[in-house]
Amino acid sequence: IIMYILVYIEFFFWCRLKLLAVLIWICLLAIGYVLVLLQVPFFLFIIFTVYTMLPFGMREAVIVSSVSALSHIVVLSIAVTSGDKKYQKDLVYQVLANAFIFLCGNLMGAFHKHQMQDASWDLYRYTLKCIQVQMKLKIEKRQQESLLLSILPAHISMGMKLAIIERLKESSDRKKHDNNFHSLYVKRHQNVSILYADIVGFTRLASDCSPKELVVMLNELFGKFDQIAKENECMRIKILGDCYYCVSGLPVSLPVHAKNCVKMGLDMCEAIKQVREATGVDINMRVGIHSGNVLCGVIGLRKWQYDVWSHDVSLANRMESAGVPGRVHITEATLNHLGKAYEVEDGNGHLRDPYLEAMHIKTFLVIDPRVTSNHHLPQTRVQDGLKMRASVRMSRYLESWGAARPFAHLNHRESVSSETAAPNRKRRKVMPRHCAFKNSSQKGRMEEDINDKMLSTIEGLNSYYTYSCLLGFIACSVFLRMSFEFKLLLLSGAVIGYFIVFNTNQPKLPINGTPPEPEFLMKQPTIMTNLYLALFYITLVLLSKQIDYYCRLDCLQKNKFKKENESFETMENVNRLLLENVLPAHVAAHFIGDNKLNEDWYHQSYDCVCVLFASVPDFKVFYTECDVNKEGLECLRLLNEIIADFDELLLKPKFSGVEKIKTIGSTYMAASGLCVTPGQENNLERQHAQIGIMVEFAMALMTKLDGINRHSFNNFRLRVGINHGPVIAGVIGARKPQYDIWGNTVNVASRMESTGELGKIQVK
């Protein structure tokens, strides 16, 4: 109730503020007529008070002040015509002089009010802009965190974020890195389980799909796998074509990491089994799992993808390729972590993979507990849909899973209300009591800003010494742009000087324009001069403090807006770099901006794209895990330098059309021809040019590797495979969106690399 009463009282007085101002003006006017008997300084004080202290608008202040001045002139004119003729001539001149004084007072008051209204309006606009920038900044921060976590796990995302911001600062300052090595964001984790899963039969199915069907199928399948991974506390690492691999035990170590991976593998096989039974499509799941240690993190400068490396990761990959469709294939190391949680049978992986046989790896197949309880259930009838293509049947079934879409969190971007952007035209003064600078540099900048706006003072040529002093006081406060301390010193010096002058020399003319009557205190010139000097001194000191406050607040608000705007621009650039680190620039435009189209899956079919695979096969031999190289960490540091140098080539204008797709171990994958100008899709000259550019890029990669060899005393050689033809591009994965390309062209390019020769480029 008390709060309601207080709010109501404040609202009541605020609504009647102008009425109170009118009452105060009438009271002051009455005092001028009754008490001080038409003395000019008091009416000058009324005029200046109307402009500076009462809450009138400019038009209202001009009217009220003009009425005050005219009332004095009219009353004094009547006194001239009805008074003693001996004083009429002097009083006529005095009326004209008073009118000129009132005019000066009105002009200075109007100037002051105009300046304060502009300052208040500027302050309001900058405050509004600051609020808008703050709101946008919060939105950008949320999107940045979401984007960053969609690329990288939280435990290394902050370091990468700081690296991006540092890179932006260096590019804006045009500074170069003093360090010859690139930053490495890789850590070692022990006791984890690695799962590799491959969809058997998907390549044949994909060849029969349209671009949209392929992207929808992959998104639904991998969206389902991401959901299963979340349920089983596994972290998806990467998607390689139709291969999905994840790790349990990252970033926080889990004692049940092996059980989590086995449970996930069984759930994946069950999900694919349901698809097969519901659609009649001949696909299956092959899963391989191994437990051990990994190095995990990010390498390179572009297209960051969280990845894991170690001999144990390579072994898990071998376990998948040597596995059995529909079964979970595990090593003895994983079995030892399972205890007796699952029944197993011999896997005989050594019979299907020479590496497993050479390393004497004993393997097992996990028996799914659900098989024994569900094998008598009747199979789903699919005869009604067999007339449709397999890809259509599968797409329609997978859409019923309802997997989240990539960058779905960008669909409903919060925005600043348009109503907030339209500022209220009613200007209200806010007059806090004090304002302080945080440091001397801000004060210096403010003083420079004030000095730039200095106006020359107005010379008063009045014959009335008292009035001239008062007008000089007002002019000093209104027109001079200087710090409050210096202005206070100036006003104080002036008032002391005036006190000395007027108390040692009596004025020849009376204050009120009539003969002196010493017996009446209010009409004694010396006393009233001192009183008016003190009154105007106090008033102008307060106004100077107000002007100084607005100047300081305006300067602080501009600096705040500048800093927040810079922060917002930095945040926008970071978000752009993050998104372009996931997607090519032309694909990123599909998901961000005012004309974003991310209501649908992104997919694109190309008639001619040149695909490159470049690997460093010798790195597998070079990579060792021992105490000398910190269990392989120093080996990865060299690989990071290789990939980072390759990424730097993409910054050259010559290779602007080359897009890095991803890295797979020590293999670098890139493509050209993905960003096509409308109408140039079938331009043969353009297609031939992009193939030539890709060959030049491959040769530049070899040159870069030779330079690294000279500095690291190694003898790495590049093996390159290039092919061109039709591909399908799209964005897959909701939790960690990933841009990729598919098609026989990609498969052939990969074969060109794997069957090529060191130091040469193999083309079809």
Image (spheres, rainbow, N blue to C red):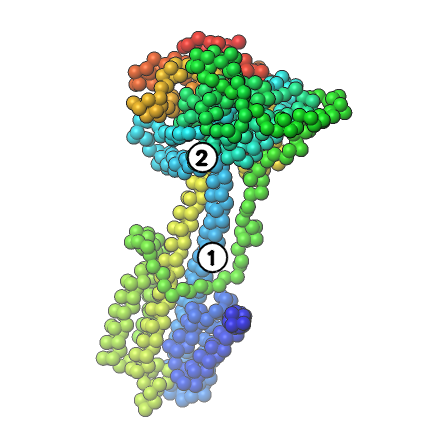
* Foreground pick, 156 / 196: 196
Tell me the residue at 48%/29% (across/down).
Answer: 339
Report the amino acid beneath label 2: Leu
Please say if 37 is above or below 14. Answer: below
Residue sitting at the far bottom: 519
Marks 2 and 1, how far apart in space?
Answer: 55 Å
User: Horizontal and vertical percent for residue 268?
Assistant: 58, 28
Please say if 720 is above or below 277. Answer: above
User: Horizontal and vertical percent for residue 498?
Assistant: 27, 74
Please say if 512 is above or below 539. Answer: below
- As drawn, the label of residue 254 is 2
Q: Answer with the quarter of the image where residue 640 lies.
A: top left
Left or right: 297 as drawn, with respect to 381: left
Tell me the residue at 28%/72% (across/down).
Answer: 495
Q: Secondary structure at mark 1?
A: helix
Q: Secondary structure at mark 2?
A: loop
User: Horizontal and vertical percent for residue 607?
Assistant: 60, 18
Residue sitting at the far right: 384
Crowding near pointer 1: few (<14 within 10 Å), some, many (20+)?
A: many
The answer to whether any part of residue 99 appears in the image is no
- As drawn, the label of residue 124 is 1
Tell me the residue at 32%/59% (across/down).
Answer: 482
The nearer-to-camera label among 2 and 1 is 2
Report the amino acid beneath label 1: Tyr
* Foreground pick, 473 / 183: 183
